[in-house]
Image (cartoon, rainbow, N blue to C red):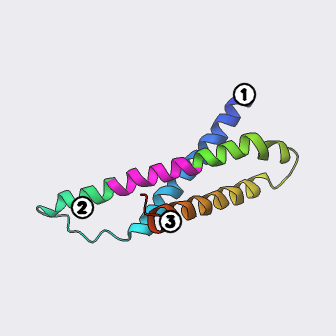
Amino acid sequence: MRILKHILAYLFWILLSLFIGIGYMRLLLGVNTVSEEGLWYLLHLFYEIGMIQVGLWVGAAIAICFVLLDVFYLRKKLKNNPKKMVIRLVALLTITVLVVIVLYLLEKVIDVI
């Protein structure tokens, strides 16, 4: 039962990370202004699929970093702390900011991506 509880908790954090990644891509790309009618429908579809696919990769990077941090560091430190969820949420948001900074550096400054 305890293992199932841990698995469900990590599943929640992973899903939250994936939604944060998709949300970041939505912020980065902006609103889809392409028409959904006629030949432009294909371009509209590529925009949506691209946003979700790249957002999922960004979210996966955030999730992997968070799960590793939680397994190897936070779980031991927060054993009897009543504010576990808040500290984990702050850690997740901090990791998100770090991943966004690295993505920006790789994409705009170094021009690797």
Task: Determine the CA span between mark 2 and mark 3.
Answer: 25 Å
Query: Could you tell me residue 43's position as x and y percent?
Result: 21, 60
The tag earlier along the polypeptide, 3 or 1, is 1
Q: Is residue 76 above or below residue 49?
A: above
Instruction: Name the residue type under label 1.
Output: Met
Instruction: Name the residue type under label 3.
Output: Tyr
The tag earlier along the polypeptide, 2 or 3, is 2
The residue furthest right is 80
Residue linked to disc 3: 104
Q: Which mark is residue 54?
A: none
Q: Nearer the viewer, residue 59 or 84?
A: 59
Query: Could you tell me residue 47's position as x and y percent?
Result: 29, 60
Task: Determine the CA span between mark 1 and mark 2.
Answer: 45 Å
Magenta stretch: give its range: 50-62
Residue linked to disc 1: 1
Residue linked to disc 2: 44
Instruction: Name the residue type under label 2.
Output: His
Q: Nearer the viewer, residue 108 or 25?
A: 108
Query: Could you tell me residue 16's position as x and y percent?
Result: 57, 52
Q: Main secondary structure of the magenta part?
A: helix
Q: Nearer the viewer, residue 24 or 13?
A: 24
Q: Is residue 49 above or below residue 109?
A: above
